[in-house]
Amino acid sequence: MLHHATAGSFLGIPGYIWFLLLTIVGVGGVIFSLSRRFQLLRLGRPVDRFDRLGERFKHMMVFAIGQKKMFRDPYAGFYHVLIFYGFLVVSLRTVSMVVEGLFRGWELPLLRTSLGHAYLFSKDIFELLVLVGLAFAAYRRAVQKPFRLLLSGQAWLVIGLIGTLMITDLGSEGARIAAGMSASWLPVSTLVSKLFAGMSTATLQAIYSGMWWIHLITLYAFANELPYGKHFHVYTALFNVFFANLDAPGKLPTMDLENIDEDTRFGIATVTDLTWKQMLDLYTCTECGRCRELCPTTLTNKPLQPVMFTRTVRDELYHEQKDLLGSPGDGKASEVELVPAVVDPDVVWACTTCRWCEEACPLDISYVDKIVEIRRNLVLDKAEFPEEAQIAFRGMEVNGNPWQLAPETRADWAEGLDIPLAGEAGGDFEYLFWVGCAGSYDDAGKKVSQAMAKVLGAAGVKFAILGPEEMCTGDSARRMGNEYLFQVLAQQNVETMNGHGVKKIVTNCPHCFNTLANEYPDFGGNYEVVHGTQLVADLVRSGRVKLTKSVQAELAYHDPCYLGRTNGEFDAPRFLLNAVPGLKVREAELSKEKAMCCGAGGGRMWLEEKLGERINQVRYTQLKETGTAEMCVACPFCNVMLANAQQELGDEEARTHDVIELVAEAIEA
């Protein structure tokens, strides 16, 4: 007779032995595979991710368990949440089925309690929801086929395996209900039981037995398949999110250049130069393609697609596993150079470090650090980099700016404006106005600097500039891989500012803002840093700056990557634009977190764009779709790139404005 704890009754001694062998092989295979992957992980360079444990746990609960980023794509988020939570709920029942087999009919006592009954009811519902989620996933892959997805047979295999787990458990429960030996208040299983109406007890016993065996064979097959494909994230996702980088998104790791010797290798040359967390990133990639959906290099047909970069490096790591690990317990460094043997140099140099990929990834996989570390190796170890980069490097090294213009002329933009130099002010200023290279030397940038001086003066803010003492922050040098040059510039700037007692800094350049705020603290530069739009927005809100003059213009606003996506400031520029009388602002479809890069970040401002479409032209076209050819930015790099795009595409009468310029124009003289 079929009863609640049925495994012991149908297995018998031969069946029990076969199940025991199946469990030993299945579990043993998983342990072997995971142990090899773990040994491989241990070959990665060390990195401390065991700090701030409370913050890490909260981060994991929000982004891994809470699936916060998933619903940025509502369709995919919907079905993934159904599958994810359903799989978690069903896991307890699957464990109980294993226990039934190992202990010949014994079941978890919890399942006999009221709480257990509530669980079984919810499990029954969730199994149906998982099947619904799988149907949505299948439809997306078979019919919709969105650009970002990498379509593969492995995805269909996993959909089939998960579906089998759900169907077999519903089938086994349905057989018990049909035999009158299980609760009929399980709604989905009760519907399934209708398929078995009128069957004999022996037949129902055979159905239950078959479903039970198929379920657990599928479980062990699934568990052993996971470490060898993109669904390895089932094991690694929680860990990858828990060990995510919790520092400011725009902060790159600082290399120790004080303790080096002839054997020191800079950056990443081989797979074993990756940190263990970077290797864990490779394990965790699901190939969902979110990272390439709005990637500027992907959208303009450059060779860099973040997901393909990750997959290529991961495949190389797996390919080398046997040689790297050797015998159990052994381990050695890779000798295969990633560039150019595995990754094309054009892939490495295409990145604009806009961080769309990192913003989009639901599992906190990083990309910018890996690409910059590879650049560091190419620049510092091999001296292999684009020819144009050398010009920028030389300019920063000799003249303190990538334009290679004389440092003595850095403050020429301020002539006649009666702006004090920090070296002469004796500390009698509240803010140091960090003008930046673009604000000092670029014609458009100079006008923005002058506008900023006008706004600060109107508010009565005491400020000073460094003038010839100011040097490039080194943002472009660092992101192009020249960490040595960056650190030289950073140390010199910090020494200068600390010598003048600088406490607060305002700058119009998001790249300078990010570097000063997030990276200079590593060199003793601890300042309160604000972007120009942030400070001016506060001045307008407090009434210290009054905008009364009408500015008749219709503009599309472009979010700079390093102000918006990287440092989370979307509101201040918009507040100011809406505060200017007469100004009409239009939002692009791709704005705020989804705004596409202008193409200048990551040092690309100084490099030729030789492959694919021009990023600045694609972005300008997107903005123009708002119905206006007039643009507005809050970044000197974006200003240059979009203004160039306007000219390149024949809109020579259109203008690119800066937010601060428009604010200054709205102040009565």
Image (tube, rainbow, N blue to C red):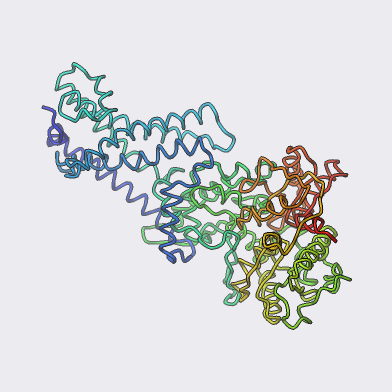
Q: Is residue 247 left or right of residue 504?
A: left
The C terminus is located in which quarter? bottom right
Name the residue at the left extreme: 1
Q: Position of residue 328 (x, y in %)?
A: 36, 58
Task: Name the residue at 79% across, 72% down.
Answer: 398
Residue 391 in sight in this render: no
Decide which of 97, 177 is in the foreground and name it: 177
The N terminus is located in which quarter? top left
**Which image quarter: residue 383?**
bottom right
**Which image quarter: residue 481?**
bottom right
Q: Position of residue 642 (x, y in %)?
A: 78, 48
Task: Name the residue at 56% across, 56% down.
Answer: 336
Residue 623 drawn above or below residue 451: above
Residue 417 in sight in this render: yes
Q: Position of residue 450 (x, y in %)?
A: 82, 64
Decide which of 46, 588 is in the foreground and name it: 588
Q: Is residue 13 left or right of residue 594?
A: left
Name the residue at the top extreme: 198
Q: Position of residue 277 (x, y in %)?
A: 48, 58
Decide which of 114, 381 is in the foreground and name it: 114
Q: Is residue 355 left or right of residue 666?
A: left
Decide which of 84, 462 is in the foreground and name it: 462
Residue 546 drawn above or below residue 206: below
